[in-house]
Image (tube, grey):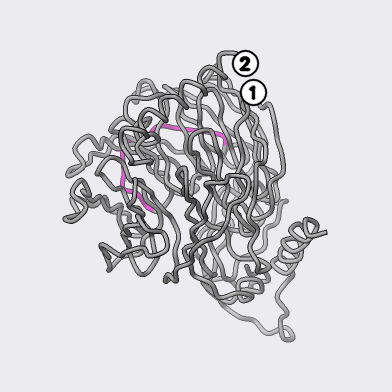
Amino acid sequence: MKKSFLYILLAACFGISLYSCAEDAGVAFNESAQGGDTGIAGSYARFITIGDFLYIVDQTDIQTFSVANPAAPVKINTQTVAAQIESIFHYEGRLFIGSGLGLFIYQIEADGIPSLLSSNVYDYPIVPCDPVVANDQYAYVSLHDQDAEGPCGGWIDINVLKIFDISDIMDPIQIAEYPMSKPKGLGLDGNILFVCDDYDGLKVFDVSDPLNIQLKHHFQGFTAFDVIPLDGLLMCVGTDNIYQFDYSDIENMTEISRIPIQS
Amino acid sequence: MKKALYFFLPLLCLTCLFSCVETEGDSFVQQEGLRPVYAAGTEWRTIETLPSREIQELGKIYYKDGLLFVNERNAGIHILDNNTPTAPIFLKFISIPGSKDIAIKGDYLYTDNVTDLVVLDISDFDNIQEVNRIENIYPQTNQEFPEFYSGFFECVNPELGTVIGWELAILNTPQCRI
């Protein structure tokens, strides 16, 4: 227990020191994918390893496993979050869970077990659930409608990117909403937000001013599902390829390779 | 009160999801949709490392130390060497029925195998070993309909076995829709 607390403390210090010298908030998380113990997942992830713990969300619950012995996970907690959970995202000791009902934020306690800090429940009854990415100040959530008018999907026609101010983590407030075509996976690196907009391709925004985000690039001609941004390399899964982009110079972001998917 | 609503509404939604489609009389309709793929018994618990092959369906991705792990939904995990992103190289394919998610800690990869959580030792790609399995971490209800899909599907019959995936097919008068 003591060890895990120390780990979190160390990770927090590491995060703070990184954050202080590079205003790029995404870096702290990205760094861990290079040479660290764990890697980095896309925004649709339902599994995540943090320190000595593995978190798994299913449609309603979050389960915590101790992986102090990584070969032998031991379940230590299960708790219900809400219905329609799609994904889990980690930023500096906090878990952001995207659900069809709202955004739920958890604090990872010293024993590794998450406790609910706050939530922001949407005004409308129900929408298909989608991913969330976040940094210290803002959380970004994508919401899209169903492909066909199913009995539930037909309720609401909504395709938006929502931005929440989470500087008061106990009280997330929606500060902006932008129309999208059909937004799915998200990726955040500093002030650059990558939005997989399904049939409308990949959109790249400068989100320095959350009240006035700027479209910098729009790559069309493919169906984009999810992304991993990592220090200038963007891996983007589409229905027919995994597209890789070099965004080390954001002004001149270019596609560098494709890994075909034979579907 | 408001809290109760969050739970009640999805329930209501689920109820309408699973309510059978009203069919007009006995009319026979052929309709494209998804059909569950069943595995009888426990054969779905067999995990094998195979030579690399092309990715056949979109899934989630995971990156660690120059390696790109690509989930092929419900089929397994492709391992690619992505140290040179302009020219990624396929290394292996791990066949894992019902796999959708990936997480890694050190030399150990965690994934789902239908309703189980499995731990694979990936320290040697030529000798990937299942070292642990925790059965039934997911409730069976997660298998009742296809994820990330909307449209007609063939209703699940649990007597036929465990659902390990879904395939596109021409369905005869499908009774379920999501």
At label 1, the amino acid type is: Asp
Q: Quadrant of the C terminus of chain B?
A: bottom right
- Residue displayed at 74% across by 64% down: B9
Which structural element holds mark 2? loop
- Does mark 1 fall on the same chain as mark 2? yes
- Image spot of residue A38 (x, y percent): 42, 28
Q: Is residue A89 left or right of residue A224?
A: right
Q: Chain of mark 1?
A: A
Query: Which residue ends up furthest to the top in the rendered image?
Result: A2
Q: Is residue A254 visible?
A: no
Magenta segment range? B45-56
Q: Are marks 2 and 1 in contact (CB under 8 Å)?
A: yes
Query: Does the segment drawn in magenta span residue B55?
Result: yes
Task: Judge whether B35 appears above or below A113 on screen.
Answer: below
Query: Does the segment drawn in magenta span residue B150?
Result: no
Which is more toward the observer, A120 or B35? A120
Q: CA distance from mark 2 to mark 1?
A: 6 Å
Task: Judge whether A100 appears above or below B22 on screen.
Answer: above
Q: To which residue does mark 1 refer?
A: A111
- Image spot of residue B55 (x, y percent): 34, 49
- Residue displayed at 33% across by 41% down: A24
Q: Quadrant of the N terminus of chain B?
A: bottom right
- Residue displayed at 65% across by 30% down: A113
Which is more toward the observer, A112 or A212? A212
